[in-house]
Image: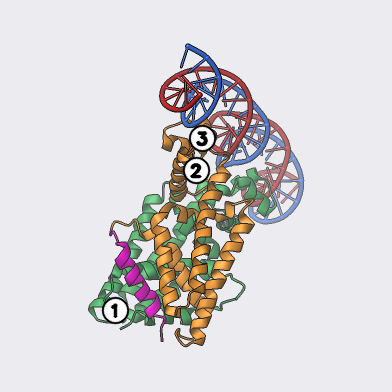
Chain colours: A orange, B green, C red, D blue
Amino acid sequence: MKPQNRKDDIVKAAAKLFKQKGYSAVTMRDLATELGIKAASLYNHINSKQELLNSIIISIAEEFTNEMNKIKNAETATDQKLTDIVELHIKIASENTYGMASLNNDWMHLEDQLEYYLTLRNGYEEDFRNIIKTGIQNKEIINENPEIILFSLLSTLRSIYLWIPKKEALDKHSLSKSLSQILIKGINT
Amino acid sequence: MKPQNRKDDIVKAAAKLFKQKGYSAVTMRDLATELGIKAASLYNHINSKQELLNSIIISIAEEFTNEMNKIKNAETATDQKLTDIVELHIKIASENTYGMASLNNDWMHLEDQLEYYLTLRNGYEEDFRNIIKTGIQNKEIINENPEIILFSLLSTLRSIYLWIPKKEALDKHSLSKSLSQILIKGINT
DNA sequence: AATTTTAACTAACACTTGTTAGTTTAGTGA
DNA sequence: TCACTAAACTAACAAGTGTTAGTTAAAATT
C-alpha cells in the first residue's frame, strides 16, 4: 500500500547528486552507485531521468506558489509580508537544500514541464513585485526602482541553500532574524 | 602574429552556450553548429572542451582577485570599499555576462584548475569578510553577524549577470547607484 | 611562382549515455 | 505449499560523446 518508499530514496539521492554536479553531469550509473545498486534497477521504480528532475523542481515551485498566495492574501503590512517571505525561503531551503540547487540551476532542462515551471516562477515574481510596489505606495519602502529591490531580495533568498550547510552552522532562527533585519530594515524608510 | 582571433570567437560562443545549458549539456557539436562549422574543426584552434571552461572561469576569477587587491589596499573608508566592490561586480557582469554564468554554476567541472580556482575564491571571500569586520569595528556597519552580511551581499552581487540582460534595461549607472544604496545604506549605522 | 599557414573538411575511434528485455532472488499472503 | 510481488540482477542496444588522423582549399608570405 506504500510502495513509494524506494522511489523517495531515489529522488532524494538524485537531488543530492544534482546539487553536486548538475543534472546533465549526473549519469544513471552515478545515481545507482550512490544507492548501491545497478543502473537498470532504478527503472523498477522510476520511468526516466527526466521524471526525477521534474518531480524535484515542480514540487518545490508549487510549494513557493502556494505559500506566496497565503502571504499576499493576508491582511498584513508590507514589512510583515516581507518577513514572511524571508522565512518561507529559509524554511524551504532548510528542508530541501538539494532540491533548491536543481530549481536554481537546472530548470532549463525541464522539458514537458518547462512552460508550467516558468508560469509558476513568473507568477511568484509578479506577486513579490506587487508587494514591493504596494510598500512603496504606502511609504513603507524607500522609493527606489522596485525592479532592483526585487532583484536584490530574490538573489539573496535564492542563494540561501548554498549557505545553510556551511560549517559556520548558521542556526535557522538567528539566520531568519538577522537576514530580515539586513534585507528589510535596510529597505524601510 | 595574432592567430588568436578565431580562438576568441570559439571561447565566446562556448561561454554563451554554457550560460544557456551549462557546461555538461553543451556538446562540441552544439558549439560547432553555433559557429557554422564542424566539431572536428574546433580542434584546429583549441585543445579540449575542458580548456574552454578553464579559460572562461579562471580569467574572470583572476580579474576579481586583482581588483579586490586594489580595493583592500586603498586608503578608503569601508563604505567606499563596498561601493567599489559593487561597481566591480557590475563591471565584470556587464562585460562578461556569459562567463559569469560558468563561474557561478560550472566551477565544479574544473579539473586541473579546480584547486587554483578555489584558492582564488576563498581569498576573495576572506578579503571581503575582513572589509566587513573592519567596518563593524569602526562602527561603520551595524553589528550583525558578518558572515550573514557577507552572504547577503555576495549573493546579490553574484546574481547581477542574470538581471543585466533583462528587458527592463537597467542601465549600468543607475543600477550601480541604486544597488549601492540598497545594499550599503541599508547596512550603515 | 613556390611555400607555408590557416582553417575548414570527412571519416572514424573508443567510450559513455539512457534505457529496455528478460531473469533471478527473497519475502509476503492465501 | 503456492502464487504473487518487490526489487535486484545480467546483457545488450542505439544514439551520442570528445577527440584524432589525415586531407583539402584558399590565403598569406617568401
Horizontally, residue A10 falls left or right of residue B27, namely left
Residue at 36 percent of width and 71 percent of height: A179
Residue at 30 percent of width and 73 percent of height: B132
B166 over A41 or under it: above or below: below
Front: mark 2 or 3: 3
Q: Is residue B17 magenta?
A: no
The answer to whether mark 2 and mark 3 are in CB contact below 8 A is: no
- Give the structural element (helix, strand or loop) at label 1: loop
Where residue D11 appears, x then y in whole percent?
Answer: 56, 20
The residue identified by callout 3 is A42
| Badge 3: residue crowd in 10 Å (few <14, some 14–19, many ≥20) | many
Q: Which residues are magenta?
A: A168-189
Q: Amino acid at mark 2?
A: Val
Please tell me which residue lies in front, A88 or B70.
A88
Residue B110 seen from this side: no
Please tell me which residue lies in front, B57 or D2.
D2
Residue at 58 percent of width and 57 percent of height: B20
Chain bearing mark 3: A
Q: Amino acid at mark 3?
A: Leu
- Give the structural element (helix, strand or loop) at label 3: helix
Where residue D20 appears, x then y in whole percent?
Answer: 57, 36
Q: Earlier in the sequence, mark 2 or mark 3?
A: 2
